[in-house]
């Protein structure tokens, strides 16, 4: 007779209150999101997010946990963008998050057999651009005025004024004209 090892115990990291609020966000909140486009920043605020003035969110933006968003003034989030805000996502003033961009502030601890959820933050500095279909991973900080080009994937942090391409993202090498 062989004995199989017991499966590791897995527990939710969400409180009952958070589960209820998430359910309301995913049902009622999404209905208001579609019906009242001018009220999207106010709706995020109603669910605990901190949103500055002059922000716009496309109709099909996906937001996981609105209370984990801290967004400055004049931020634009494009169609089909994902703000997977399991951890805090902080976005500075004047940032553009383009179509299909994905900010992922959540992962799992693969070194633990229970595979617990981790929620490392993401910070995007003021004046930055996250390009079409670009990806920003957990625990990444992009400094002010960074450009993450379309389809690039940032898995580590970069300082101010960095232009990034590729997967994994790497700084664009200066051209010979710029160096001259």
Image: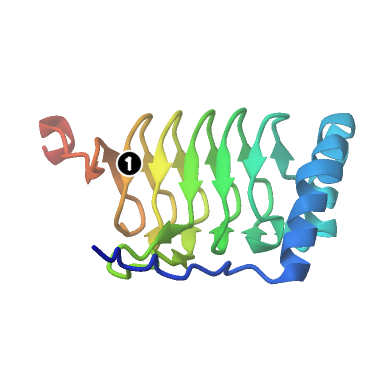
Does residue 29 appear in this view? yes
Residue 177 position within the rendered picture, expressed as x and y whole percent measured from the top left: 15, 31
Residue 91 position within the rendered picture, expressed as x and y whole percent measured from the top left: 56, 55
Closer-to-camera residue (12/87): 12
Q: Which residue is pictured at 77% across the width and 52% down the height?
A: 23
Task: Please give left or right for residue 1 compared with residue 74 in the image.
Answer: left
Residue labelled with disc 1 = 153
Task: Please give left or right for residue 178 compared with residue 144 in the image.
Answer: left
Residue 13 position within the rendered picture, expressed as x and y whole percent measured from the top left: 57, 69
Closer-to-camera residue (14/1): 1
Does residue 120 appear in this view? no
The image quadrant where one finds the N terminus is: bottom left
Q: Secondary structure at mark 1?
A: strand
Name the image quarter holding residue 71.
Answer: bottom right
Q: Which residue is pictured at 37% across the width and 40% down the height?
A: 148
Q: Is residue 120 above or below residue 154?
A: below
Q: Which residue is pictured at 27% across the width and 68% down the height?
A: 111
């Amino acid at each position: 007779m062989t004995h199989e090892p017991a499966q590791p115990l897995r527990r939710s990291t969400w409180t009952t209150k958070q589960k209820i609020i998430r359910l309301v966000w995913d049902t009622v909140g999404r209905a208001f999101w579609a019906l009242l486009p001018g009220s999207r920043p106010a709706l995020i605020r109603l669910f605990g997010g901190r949103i500055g003035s002059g922000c716009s969110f496309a109709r099909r933006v996906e937001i996981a946990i609105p209370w984990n968003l801290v967004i400055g003034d004049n931020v634009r989030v494009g169609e089909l963008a994902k703000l997977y805000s399991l951890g805090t996502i902080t976005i500075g003033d004047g940032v553009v998050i383009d179509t299909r961009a994905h900010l992922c502030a959540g992962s799992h601890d693969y070194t633990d057999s229970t595979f617990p959820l981790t929620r490392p933050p993401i910070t995007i500095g003021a004046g930055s651009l996250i390009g079409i279909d670009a990806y920003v991973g957990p625990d990444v900080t992009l400094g002010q005025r960074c450009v993450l080009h379309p389809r690039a994937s940032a898995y580590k942090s970069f300082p101010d004024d960095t232009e990034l391409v590729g997967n994994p993202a790497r700084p664009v090498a200066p051209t010979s004209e710029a160096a001259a």
